[in-house]
């Protein structure tokens, strides 16, 4: 690597809204997206909500000359919807499926069936190791009464932990995706504080696109006004985030979004806006590096966001345990009723009614049983997240007690801490 | 770190057979295990099958003076059963739950409900970063006709990938656990070839314990002869595996196993034998280092084991798709029967019989529906594993084509390969 070396990285991100049978003009949008990606020849195109593998295969064939490497991340029943097209060889890839992802009985919301995940690609560019992550978190259906908040916080934490543990030898880290989180939402702050990732929209000096960088805007003909709720300008939930190791300086030269239509003022590619970023990586003396390798330089905002996340996850855990208990009682009640119905049918009393009630009762027992087991597992997973948050919180507090100069080193594990216990 | 530096690491591993209500003399065994661990004061004690969190809490209280740090890995409905006690502070921990882990309808085998996982602990010892992993893979119930083989191979691959991607900055890597794999089984070879981990039993010059290092032996009063099948001497399925980065040399000074009773010739701690290893880490010039950092030095055994794993996973995928299709037909049939029963009941013909058949039919539709979705998800996860294996296989073949001197570098990603495509 030469001293005056500069790596220029052009990145494209889009939630494609590719739901078979449901998303409007899907085939046409996918085709036009392919044409655009081919013409622009980005280094990396990271896509979400490509729910149909046929769409991925279609794009793959179409993009093969420009993007010789591609990968589709398979998970869950429907899939993760994540895929990536790369101009450069993909050295390695893997994925992590989020432990919590909504409720199977919320069939109309469908997230549980999707296997939401984070995908990792390792690329080697000009002697640098680039870890590129693509993700899609659980959707937010009701901001005022969000039953999925604890799950989304847990997903943001799992995402942050996955990046933290898998990027320790990476020179450059890039995360693109639909986080379903507004910039000041707990999950977004937690992710940024724990990984030290920077938000391209906040960092760039050259932004062109929708007002306030929104990625779902009312001008987009596929967006229903009620989806935006109390945000008439739109919402910003899709991101390009990045960081580089000490010794390297990464910056976002330009960031563009589409603005409710495709880049040629035609119909939009999706109900989300696309993000197009040009990142520059160059040498920098460590002391001048504004992007820390891992974790934050100050532990106070971290401590505060960890505490907030802990409280949210704790509340979610209590809720999950409550549901598990209620369902446990329902199983007991159902079994009692079944015994009663058997006795009635055997004794010849109201035989027909007893037989008619038999089915819903068996349904009650099985349904409540499954509900009980599901919420037990939910409580266990949230407890795991809470324990991890508590451990990091404990270490952040230790770092604070030791004074500011010890904070980054202790938090990033460059020296041994005192005895650490987990709850 | 001084030039003549040596790190001595004493490690204990045991599958504790701690099933509440089912495992014999559990409370007594856990108590005696605690006494032994306190007396021996290992650096790390890694335990599996601690299914009851009360047992963990009991041990934690008991071991607190000797092992101030501890962690219980929570997952699934029952739990992962994994926990760890450490004399040294735990800097970080996280876990990965295996995507595939048996079948929910195999209730008597119970594995699906357990959330089998791999747990990771990061410790800092004498300036070195130690990544310690603890795991427990799906049990083998019938070696002749093993319906879980594809799942266990997929788990071994996920375990290897998790270690590969999270240990890139670790100086020393340690994996302990019950792999439910014999030393020459496909999963075990795959894990060792892809991670470059060494088997303490095969490496040590000072072994004391059961014949051939077996960890389930007929002499153990809790082991039933039929569990050992055609292996009268016992089986070796619990392991201590390790490696160190280039520049460090790691060796197993001593390895001991219990031999069907506890170390004082009393009743055994478990139905498995405990492993006690003393590892030594010291400086070594890179060229003399017999333990490669990541991946193998020769790609030929890797290529062969990857190909074998690919075939096994591919077969599992075909099986999963077949079951999903059969279940899909069963749903259709069930719906037809339901419509027929409704018509019969409404028309007044054989009304009582129709009502009686209603419940099993609803059960058929719901059960077959769940079965269909489960096997769809299984097929998707196996497809993911197959794609990852194929990608690595492709790269291993490229490395072979480039000649032996390029193999380690290309496989370990130290230089850019040619265009890489995944299927």
Image: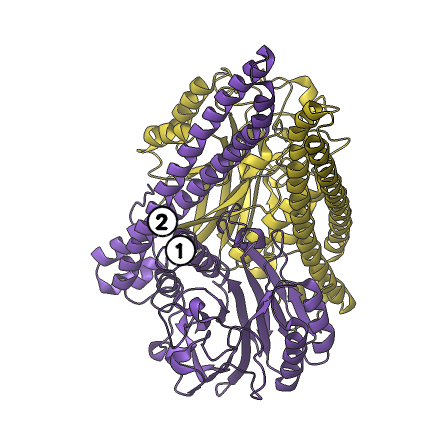
Chain colours: A yellow, B purple
Q: For mark 1, does the 10 Å Cα neighbourhood hold few (<14), some (14 to 19), or many (20 or more) residues? A: many
Point out which mark residue B114 bears.
Answer: none
Vertical order, B348 against B279 (above or below):
above
Q: Is residue B323 left or right of residue A245?
A: left
Q: Is residue B64 left or right of residue B419?
A: right
The foreground one among B19 and A43 is: B19
Q: Is residue A46 left or right of residue A189?
A: left
Q: What is the quadrant of residue A135 in the picture?
A: top right
- Whether tag 2 and tag 1 are in contact, CB under 8 A, the answer is yes
Vertical order, B199 against B262 (above or below):
above
Q: Position of residue A381 (x, y in %)?
A: 65, 51
| Residue at 59% from the left image edge and 27% from the top image edge | B356
Point out which mark residue B153 bears.
Answer: 1
Q: Position of residue A237 (x, y in %)?
A: 63, 33
Q: Which residue is mark 2?
A: B313
Residue A198 appears in the rendering: yes
Chain on which label 1 sits = B
Local SS, label 1: helix
Residue A90 appears in the rendering: no
Q: Quadrant of the C terminus of chain B?
A: top left
Mark 2 vs 1, N-terminal side: 1
The foreground one among A241 and B222 is: B222
Give the spatial CA distance, label 2 vs label 1. Answer: 7 Å
| Residue at 52% from the left image edge and 83% from the top image edge | B7
| Residue at 57% from the left image edge and 76% from the top image edge | B127
């Amino acid at each position: 690597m030469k001293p005056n070396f500069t790596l220029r990285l052009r990145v494209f991100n889009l939630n494609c809204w590719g739901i078979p049978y449901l998303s409007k003009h899907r085939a046409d949008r996918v085709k036009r997206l392919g044409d655009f990606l081919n013409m622009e020849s980005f280094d990396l195109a990271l896509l979400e909500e490509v729910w149909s593998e046929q769409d991925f295969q279609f794009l793959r064939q179409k993009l093969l000359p420009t993007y010789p490497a591609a990968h589709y991340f398979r998970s869950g029943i429907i899939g993760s919807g994540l895929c990536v097209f790369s101009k450069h060889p993909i050295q390695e890839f893997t994925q992590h499926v989020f432990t919590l992802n909504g409720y199977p009985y919320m069939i109309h919301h469908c997230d549980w069936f999707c296997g939401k995940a984070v995908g990792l690609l390792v690329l080697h560019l000009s002697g640098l190791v680039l870890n590129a992550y693509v993700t899609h978190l659980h959707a937010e259906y009701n901001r005022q009464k969000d039953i999925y908040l604890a799950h989304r916080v847990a997903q943001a934490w799992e995402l942050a932990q996955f990046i933290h543990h898998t990027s320790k030898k990476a020179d450059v880290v890039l995360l693109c995706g639909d986080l379903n989180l507004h910039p000041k939402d707990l999950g977004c702050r937690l992710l940024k504080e724990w990984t030290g990732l920077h938000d391209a929209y906040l960092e760039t000096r050259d932004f062109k696109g929708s007002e306030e960088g929104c990625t779902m805007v009312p001008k987009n003909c596929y967006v229903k006004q009620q989806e935006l709720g109390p945000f008439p300008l739109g919402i910003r939930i899709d991101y390009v985030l990045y960081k580089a190791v000490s010794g390297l300086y990464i910056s976002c030269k330009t960031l563009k979004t589409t603005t409710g239509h495709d880049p040629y003022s035609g119909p939009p590619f999706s109900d989300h806006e696309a993000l197009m970023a040009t990142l520059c990586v160059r040498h920098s003396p460590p002391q001048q590096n504004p992007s820390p390798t891992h974790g934050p330089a100050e532990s106070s905002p971290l401590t505060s966001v960890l505490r907030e996340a802990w409280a949210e996850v704790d509340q979610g855990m209590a809720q999950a345990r409550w549901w598990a208990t209620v369902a446990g009682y329902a199983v007991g009640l159902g079994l009692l009723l079944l015994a009663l119905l058997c006795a009635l049918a055997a004794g010849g009393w109201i035989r027909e009614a007893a037989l008619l009630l038999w089915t819903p009762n068996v349904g009650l027992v099985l349904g409540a049983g499954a509900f009980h087991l599901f919420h037990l597992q939910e409580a266990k997973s949230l407890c795991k997240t809470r324990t991890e948050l508590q451990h990091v919180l404990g270490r952040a507090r230790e770092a604070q007690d030791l004074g500011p100069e010890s904070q980054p080193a202790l938090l990033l594990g460059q020296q041994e801490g005192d005895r650490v216990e987990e709850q």
